[in-house]
């Protein structure tokens, strides 16, 4: 019965952590953006003390709110948010707004790919933010807000992603000792070998991230250490 229940809820999984479950804890309730029809846990998107029920279509995600303010009219579900892209992975989706840096130029490149990011609001996926701590810090983890860029973003690399073999974009190095694998955050998160978990409020420290080869090894080490 549990399998059948989860199967029925597949269209209601959290877009951020990919979990279909809901919990008694209020902030782990699934809510839905009434414009883009996407579900997410309140805690994963930084919605605290919100009365939205898991069944009700009662909120707008931040990009939809922004588009509504800019356009000044009713949103079109077929076209909204398509031009708002994450500064890390360049994909659309459920994003959070980023503080525009005042002390340095954001991009150290003249690539036309960044034209859509110039002179307007800047956005990022929460999962891209928490795994890009070399460049990004989240000052308010409860609301997933006040997201700051720490230094100019460098997109051209002399290393390649171990998943897509591309060398353009923000690359992260595996934290496992002596591993020299590099990867895009979004490539790793799409890997079937990697399991995303709910974002916990208390986890406000730097997140370690491993390649697909060493994630299971490190998970087993952490499990064994926790059992001691």
Image (cartoon, rainbow, N blue to C red):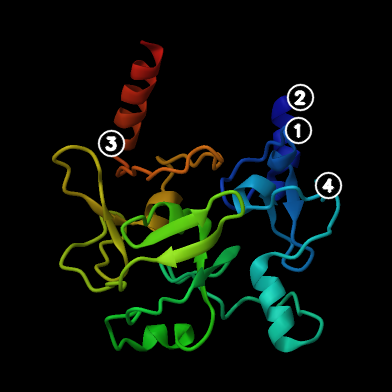
Per the model, the C-alpha gap separating discs 4 and 1 is 19 Å
205 to the left or right of 65: left
Label 2 crowd bin: few (<14), some (14–19), many (20+), radius 10 Å: few
Would you identify the image quadrant in which residue 37 lies?
Answer: bottom right
Secondary structure of the residue carrying tag 3 is loop
Between disc 4 and disc 1, the foreground one is: 4
Q: Is residue 79 visible?
A: no
The mark that comes first in sequence, 4 or 2, is: 2
Q: Is residue 141 above or below residue 60?
A: above
Q: Within 10 angstroms of label 1, few (less than 14), some, or many (20 or more) residues?
A: few
Q: Element type at marker 2?
A: loop
Q: Are marks 2 and 1 in contact (CB under 8 Å)?
A: yes
The residue carrying mark 1 is 5
Which quadrant of the view contains residue 2? top right
Q: Position of residue 12 (x, y in %)?
A: 72, 48
Q: Earlier in the sequence, mark 2 or mark 3?
A: 2
Residue ID for mark 2: 1
Residue hosting label 4 = 53
């Amino acid at each position: 019965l549990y399998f059948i229940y989860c199967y029925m809820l597949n269209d209601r999984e959290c877009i951020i952590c990919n979990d279909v479950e809901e919990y008694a804890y209020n902030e782990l309730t699934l809510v839905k953006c009434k414009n883009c029809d996407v579900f997410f846990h309140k805690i994963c998107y930084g919605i605290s003390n919100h009365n939205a029920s898991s069944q009700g279509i009662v909120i707008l995600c931040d990009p939809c709110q922004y588009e509504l303010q800019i356009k000044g009219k009713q949103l079109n579900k077929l076209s909204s948010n398509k031009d708002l892209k994450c500064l890390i992975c360049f994909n659309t989706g459920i994003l959070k707004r980023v503080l525009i840096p005042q002390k340095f130029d954001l991009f150290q490149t003249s690539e036309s790919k960044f034209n859509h990011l110039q002179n307007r609001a800047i956005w990022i996926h929460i999962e891209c933010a928490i795994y890009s701590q070399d460049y990004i810090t989240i000052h308010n983890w409860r609301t997933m807000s006040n997201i700051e860029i720490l230094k100019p973003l460098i997109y051209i690399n002399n290393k390649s992603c171990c998943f897509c073999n591309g060398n353009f974009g923000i690359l992260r190095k595996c934290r496992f000792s002596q591993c020299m694998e590099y990867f895009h955050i979004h490539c790793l998160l799409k890997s079937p070998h990697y399991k995303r978990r709910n974002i916990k409020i208390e986890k406000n420290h730097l997140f370690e991230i491993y390649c697909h080869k060493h994630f299971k090894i490190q998970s087993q080490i952490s499990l064994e250490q926790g059992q001691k």
